[in-house]
Image (cartoon, helix red, strand yellow):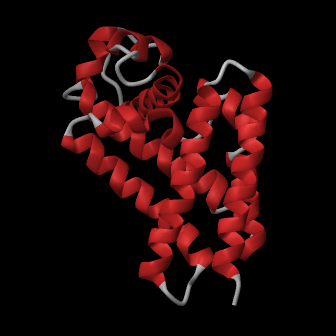
Amino acid sequence: MVRYTKEHKQETRQRIIATAGRRLKRDGIDGSGVATLMKDADLTNGAFYAHFESKDSLVAEAVTDQLHTLHANIVELAEPGRAGLEQIVRWYLSAHHRDNPGDGCPNAALLDEIGRSADAIRQAYTDGVLVVIDDLAARMAPEDPPSARVKALSLLGLMAGTLQLSRALTDRQLSDDLLEQGLRNALALVDAELRP
């Protein structure tokens, strides 16, 4: 029997979480079985329980990881203030993001299923999304954090809803038009917030 180091086990666990996050965003929580999630990580089904007590525990960690990745790769790298908000909105409501859900935001990909999930998954989502929201809020109205948090949540809701609708449409031109209108609406919300 091969004994692995603690570091190897942690690296393997992180690989499972990362690959599961991408699969969940592509195929959904219900559409992603443990066997598929483990295969994506190049592991056998039997290895799953060495790392997670249940599929729900993996989903909760994957949602947390995906929101952390969103924050680290998109929100943190954006310029400060309005320019950064525009960068975020333009990325979020892009055709590339629409067409590549596995590489994008877990909000538009998983919200409907997260809402019907176990409390642990919903709590992981809430904790992770609040980090993103608070960063957006700090850019929108740093002098009024409680009000800014609600407005940032509205901005994210507008963007996630627009992206979800654009992904559902079979008419590509209509989908593109929806993204463009959503972009204008989101930027108008940003500009209204930043107006003195």
Q: Which residue is at 54% across, 90% downward?
A: 143
Residue 55, by quadrant, is top left
Q: Which residue is at 42% across, 62% downward?
A: 130
Q: x and y percent of residue 12 in the render?
A: 42, 28
Residue 177, by quadrant, is top right
Q: x and y percent of residue 21 in the render?
A: 47, 31
Horizontal placement of 27 versus 103: left or right? left
Horizontal placement of 159 versus 81: left or right? left
| Above or below for 194 versus 133 | below
Q: Where is the C terminus found, in terms of image quarters?
A: bottom right
Q: Where is the N terminus found, in terms of image quarters?
A: top left
Q: x and y percent of residue 51 in the render?
A: 28, 28
Horizontal placement of 85 versus 136: left or right? right
Q: x and y percent of residue 173 in the render?
A: 80, 27
Q: Which residue is at 45% across, 70% downward?
A: 150
Q: Nearer the viewer, residue 63 or 87?
A: 87
Q: Nearer the viewer, residue 144 or 182?
A: 182
| Above or below for 195 versus 164 | below
Q: Nearer the viewer, residue 132 or 65?
A: 132
Horizontal placement of 195 versus 47: left or right? right
Looking at the image, how many numbered discs can be counted on the residues? Answer: 0
Q: Which residue is at 59% across, 28% downward?
A: 102
| Above or below for 33 versus 113 | above
Would residue 155 be visible to someone looking at this image?
Answer: yes
| Above or below for 94 versus 23 | below
Residue 9, by quadrant, is top left
Would residue 6 be visible to someone looking at this image?
Answer: no
